[in-house]
């Protein structure tokens, strides 16, 4: 089932799924509000939440001790690039080397795309993103080869996380755009694919927009447009057309919106809010052409009532060769540079990101989806600062773990610091000698 289709709301009574469902007890976790709790999962739902030590596992169920961990709703990734991920060091023409007519002269290696897309998705899953939306280019000369590769990746990830591709043609208008229009229709007919576009690269951006929204409306799928958002006339046209589309409309990264005069940007933001258009910003860096830089004006958009989510964008490709694809880093940057409170910043990569993807809300309460992230730490601000060790839960089971261990040499400088766990390890050649070990 596509992550972008409407899903049933969580049962208010917290009823678990049917008999025979797997169960998992997350014990002694700390919530963002400071409470220490046990959380029992049955099937893909949270079955019960109680004070720490008050709950036991269902007979035969597993238990995970989350002492020292903060338990949060899992983040989601609303704007990745699956076909170009991890390609920064690839030989030959880069994934962004596209002629003006939107065609590709270099053949596409579908198996190579699938391999990189899978590795990238697993990296982001390890960071905590249990749902991902990834832009994938389609164009004359390559057809749907990259999209088919990412769809294979989605099938291989079943049970680990949800991956939804966005089919992104570059050229859709005029006679030269006929093949792009046909490819976009063919792509969304395959199911579970969002209608996408890049209006900035089309000679007729408004016509490009109309073509994407027309296909989205025909097939009842969301639309997701990759744009700098630096044309207020085009943004006004978008707002006018988006209200007529039944499915959701998302645009990003919209860094160009920050370069407009504040009055012009403010009016554009108000129109987007009235039309229900969501914006995905990319605090970790641009994506697409390597020259694209900057971050959307998050404060201005939020003040106007626009739903703002944060994505990762490029993951070690030509646009950002050091991109991490880490939603917690995106939240950290929103808190440290955009002035958002830690709770607001994390909400941009979790609740807001899930809403953009059309996914149901997650709370650590009975009846809600068991999509959770446990991070070693006691407070959200600390977690965003040093988010090392993580445990990821998707559909009620642990699907990824990341552990970090810091070691210090055994010397006079290694003091008994608060909360420092001092354990001895055998000395390693060239390494810290029998020093204290701190698990992060």
Image (cartoon, rainbow, N blue to C red):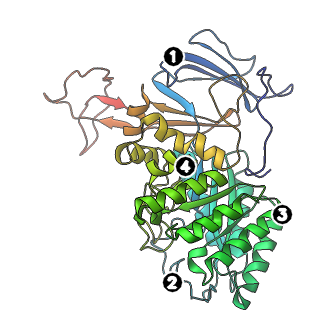
**Label 2: which residue?**
93
* Quadrant of image for the C terminus: top left
Tell me the number on the disc at residue 131: none
Alpha carbon separation for disc pair 1 and 4? 28 Å
- Mark toward the start of the polypeptide (2 vs 4): 2
Q: Helix, strand or loop at disc 2?
A: loop
Q: How many labels does the image show?
A: 4
- Mark toward the start of the polypeptide (1 vs 4): 1
Image x and y of residue 294, in percent: 40, 62
Alpha carbon separation for disc pair 3 and 1? 45 Å
- Mark toward the start of the polypeptide (3 vs 1): 1
**Label 4: which residue?**
308
Give the image quarter of residue 107: bottom right
Label 1 crowding class (10 Å Cα cut-off): few <14, some 14-19, many 20+? Answer: some
Residue 350 sits above or below residue 169 on the image: above
**What residue sits 42% from the left and 27% below the top?**
379
Name the residue nearer the viewer: 426 or 179: 179
Tell me the number on the disc at residue 219: 3
């Amino acid at each position: 089932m596509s992550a972008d289709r409407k899903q049933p709301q969580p049962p208010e009574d917290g009823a678990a799924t049917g008999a025979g469902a797997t169960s998992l007890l997350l014990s002694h976790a700390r919530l963002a509000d400071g409470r220490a709790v046990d959380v029992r999962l049955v099937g893909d739902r949270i079955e019960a939440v109680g004070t720490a030590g008050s709950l036991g596992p269902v007979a035969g169920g597993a238990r995970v001790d989350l002492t020292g961990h903060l338990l949060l709703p899992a983040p989601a990734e609303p704007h990745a690039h699956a076909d170009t991920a991890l390609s920064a060091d690839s030989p030959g023409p880069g994934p962004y080397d596209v002629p003006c007519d939107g065609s590709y002269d270099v053949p596409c290696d579908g198996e190579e795309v699938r391999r990189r897309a899978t590795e990238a998705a697993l990296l982001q899953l390890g960071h905590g993103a249990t749902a991902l939306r990834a832009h994938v280019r389609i164009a004359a000369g390559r057809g749907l080869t990259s999209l088919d590769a990412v769809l294979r990746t989605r099938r291989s990830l079943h049970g680990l996380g949800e991956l939804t591709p966005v089919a992104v043609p570059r050229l859709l208008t005029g006679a030269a755009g006929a093949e792009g229009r046909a490819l976009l229709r063919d792509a969304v007919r395959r199911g579970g694919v969002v209608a996408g576009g890049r209006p900035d690269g089309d000679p007729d951006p408004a016509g490009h927009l109309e073509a994407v929204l027309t296909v989205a409306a025909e097939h009842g799928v969301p639309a997701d447009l990759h744009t700098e958002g630096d044309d207020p006339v085009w943004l006004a046209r978008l707002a006018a057309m988006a209200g007529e589309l039944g499915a959701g409309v998302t645009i990003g990264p919209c860094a160009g919106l920050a370069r407009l005069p504040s009055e012009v940007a403010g009016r554009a933001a108000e129109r987007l809010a009235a039309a229900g258009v969501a914006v995905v910003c990319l605090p970790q860096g641009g994506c697409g052409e390597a020259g694209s830089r900057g971050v959307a004006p998050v404060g201005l958009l939020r003040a106007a009532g626009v739903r703002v989510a944060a994505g990762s964008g490029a993951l070690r490709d030509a646009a950002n060769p050091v991109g991490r694809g880490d939603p917690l880093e995106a939240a950290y940057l929103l808190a440290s540079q955009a002035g958002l409170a830690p709770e607001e910043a994390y909400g941009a990569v979790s609740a807001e990101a899930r809403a953009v993807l059309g996914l149901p809300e997650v709370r650590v309460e009975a009846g809600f989806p068991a999509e959770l992230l446990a991070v070693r730490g006691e407070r959200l601000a600390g977690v965003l600062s040093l988010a090392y060790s993580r445990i990821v839960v998707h559909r009620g089971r642990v699907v990824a773990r990341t552990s970090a261990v810091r070691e210090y040499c055994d010397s006079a400088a290694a003091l008994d610091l608060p909360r420092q766990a001092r354990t001895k390890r055998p000395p390693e050649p060239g390494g810290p000698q029998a020093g204290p070990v701190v698990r992060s």
